[in-house]
Amino acid sequence: MDRLAFNAMAAINEERIGRHQLSNDIANVSTVGFKRTFEVTLQPHQAVGEGFDSRLQPRMYANDQIILDPGPLMVTGRDLDVAMNHKTVLGVTASNGELAFTRRGDLKVNANGVLETGSGHIVRSQDGGPITVPQGFKLSFGSDGNLYAIDPAQQGVPQQQVIAQLLLKDASDTALAKREDGLFKVDGKPAGTDFASGTGPVSLTPQALEGSSVNPMASMVKLIEQSRSFEHQVRIIKESKSNDESGASMMKVG
């Protein structure tokens, strides 16, 4: 009966990764531009060692690449809100100064006049530097990633001026993984590594935001399934103990 308890305990331990991932997804249901990163599956694995030739142990296999499927589009009407279309990602500067990427488009101008995301990461321009915005100018974005500014004090009809272009990359041909700070990096490469834009289109939807790609209902169903699986594995361990005790009692009687 030790095999039952051993495999049940292994299943509980392996499913821990999936529970953590699911909890993280549910916590970010309302996070702008949040992307799911984890797909996990539980598969049997041949146990290795003397006396274990016939044993199969459950093992969790995970894919940590970011799933860039688009989330719901929310029209806000705010000039500095942008939603990235297709597989487009935005280049930003992480808190440690490294190049990173994101799908978060709730942009703002900080106290120093520098454009940053809602989470405080500095947005990079096409040349790799920060974007400084002239004070008092009215800003707007084009679908191509150009940042336009209008001087309200200009005489006559105000003219739009292109002051910067966002660092946008198409990631349809590049696998991305999530950093510890929630930003994206190239999967399998050191943090801060750049990549060549793919062949897909790069564009924005101005005055809109992309919602989280997490499906709340599907996540809740998975959470219930994982809870039931945990209870089932615990029940197996208890039944294994009960069977062992019954067998020991029969041996004593004999």
Image (spheres, rainbow, N blue to C red):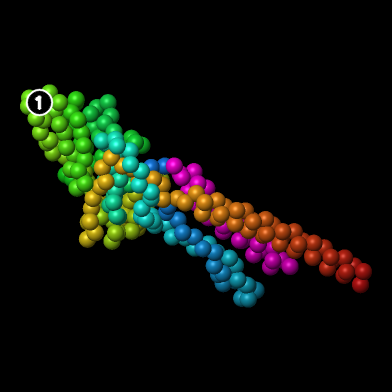
Which residue extends farthest bottom? 54
Quick one: 110 or 84, which is closer to the camera? 84
As drawn, 155 above or below 243: above
Image quarter (top left, top right, bottom left or bottom right) of the C terminus: bottom right
Report how many numbered discs are placed on residues in the image.
Answer: 1
- Give percent across and percent down for residue 27: 49, 43
Q: Position of residue 243 (x, y in %)?
A: 79, 65
Residue bearing the label numbered 1:
154
Task: Name the residue at 29% across, 55% down.
Answer: 86
In the image, the segment drawn in magenta is 1-30
x and y percent of residue 140 in the render? 21, 37
Residue count near mark 1 (Cα–Cα under 10 Å), binned few <14, some 14–19, many ≥20: few
Rendering quarter of residue 250: bottom right
Seen from the viewer's position, the closer of residues 53 and 31 is: 31
| Residue at far front of view | 157
Residue at point 24%, 27% (across, down): 112
Residue drawn at (63%, 58%) of the image: 229
Instruction: Determine whether, in the image, residue 202 is placed left or right of residue 160.
Output: right
The answer to whether residue 41 shows anywhere in this view is yes
Say if 43 sits above or below 150 in the image.
below
Indicate whether residue 209 is drawn in magenta. no
Residue sticking out furthest to the right: 253
Residue 96 visible? The answer is no
Per the image, label 1 sits on a secondary structure element best described as loop
